[in-house]
Structures are given as C-alpha cells and as structure tokens.
Image: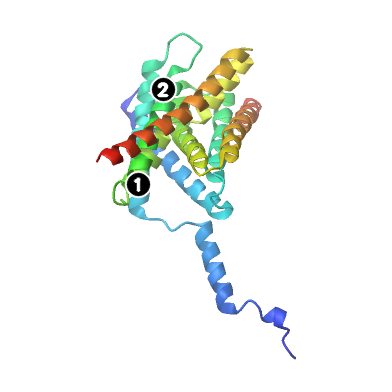
Amino acid sequence: MPTSPDLALPPPRAGLRRRAAKRQRLMPRLDRREVAAIFAGGAAGALLRAALVRLGSGGAPGWPWTTFGVNLAGAFALGYFATRLQERLPLSTYRRPFLGTGVCGALTTFSTLQLELLTMLDAHRYGLALGYASASIVAGYATVHLATAVVRRARVHA
Amino acid sequence: MSLATWVGVALLGGVGATLRFLVDAVVSGRAGRAFPLGTLAVNLSGAVALGFVAGLAVPETASVLAGTAAIGAYTTFSTWMLETQRLTEDGEADRALVNALLSLALGLGAVALGRSIGAHW
C-alpha cells in the first residue's frame, strides 16, 4: 500500500525531538543546587517576614504597614539583584535562585495583600482599599525601576 | 511563638518558595514567556489558598504556618512588579498595565472565592 506523503510527515526523528522538547518544557530539568538555594532563600525570607509580622502586629487597624513595607523592600531588593546578577556579574548558579526567587519571593506576598484588600472592602473602607492597591502597585513598580537605575548607573561609573 | 513554630516557618517557607519555582517553570514552559502567566498562576492559586485558610478561621499558630510561611512564601509581590517593569522596558507598556491590573482584579476574586469555600467547609 502506498504511503501518502501527508502521513509520512513529519519524519519520526523530528517527531521524537519535538516530543522530547515538549516533555522538557512540561517538567523542567531540576538542578539540585538551584532547588536547595531556593529552599534556603525561601526559609530565610519567610522567617524574616514572620518576625516582622510579629513586631508589626497590634498597631492601629488601617494601613497594613508590615505588608506594604516588606513588599516594597523585597521589590527593591529583587530589582537590584536581578539587574546586577543579570547584567553586571558573571552568571552564578545559585545567587539569583537564593536571593531573588528564595529570599525576595518569600519575603514579599501577593496573597496577604489581596486578603487585606478584601477585608477593607468588607468594612466598606473603599478609599483605603483603592489607596492601598494603587500605592502598592505604583510604589512597587517605581521601586523596581529605581533599583534597576541604581545598578545601571553604577556600571557607567565603574 | 515557640521554637518549633519558627522551625516550621523556615521549612514551610522553603517549601512554598520551591513550589512557586516549580509551578512557574511548568506554566511558563507551556505558555511561553511573552506574558508572565507563571507568576499569575502562582499568585492566583495562592490567593485562593490564603482565602481558604482565612475562611476556616484557624488558630493563630496554624495561621502563621499556613498563611504567613507557606502561602506567603509561595506567592510573590516582588516578581510580579519586576516582570511588570521589565515588560515596560521591552516596549510592552500595554501588557505591563494588563499584568498589573488583571493580577489585582483576579487576585481579589481568588481570595474572596477561597474564603467563601473555607467558610462553608
């Protein structure tokens, strides 16, 4: 029986390659040292945030200073490290995972910010919720921008 | 807070961060990196989870372990902002705006959904 050219395509090798590439995309190859760095950074970031939450609790209800503070500090640090490690220093296997993905990622939080916003809406404090949401986004964005500029300016003078 | 709770915070923080890395890698691997869907997936699933914990009204220690440590380390504000800023740098200001506002709006819905599930659990 003659094989239709349509059925003959794609050649098996290309198909296998595609399948292998797809499998790799679905489940990334894990570098144990990288995962360990993320785990350690996540542990450090969570400890720091839990300690700050304890220190910051008991204040007047209203503006969530602890979440706001850790989020901006973490955004600045991530902007700084990501730019510095990507554009200035030689590629390192575990500095970015430890500092960026681990510490900054775990120190900052999206979920608590959202829960705080929901609580404000429950209490009909719409102005506060709007102010908190917009201040977080605008200041978070500006902070990353600033940290990036700081690193890039340092390169000019280096 | 007891020493055991602090140890738990460290371990669960490590687990949360590692899980974020894995989920982000899997989602970004499938969806590509034109739009930061990996972080969006992490943050929305984490918002549902934190809402759920809040709806359950668990004791304080459990709330610190699950909410602050595990889910807090899982979700991220810093990467969300970094990716938004990098989109603007790449001339994708419209995608940056969508990323900022869509995450915020969907996140609010996600945490509300999680809380109502937790409250009726």
Q: In the image, A140: left or right of B2?
A: right
Badge 1, how many Cα within 10 Å: few under 14, some, many 20+? Answer: few
Q: In the image, A122: left or right of A42?
A: right
Residue on which disc 2 sits = A69
Residue at image position (52%, 27%) is A137
Label 2 residue SS: helix
Residue at image position (53%, 43%) is B91
Q: Amino acid at mark 1?
A: Glu
Camera-nearest residue between B69 and A115: A115
Residue A158 image-quadrant placement: top left
Camera-nearest residue between B19 and B30: B30
Residue A81 image-quadrant placement: top left
Residue B11 is at least partly visible in this image: no
Disc assigned to residue B70: none
- Answer above or below: position of A111 versus A88: above
Residue A151 at x, y percent in the picture: 33, 37
- Answer above or below: position of B23 versus B59: below
- First along the sequence among labels 2 and 1: 2
Residue on which disc 1 sits = A87
Quadrant where the N terminus of chain B sits is: top left
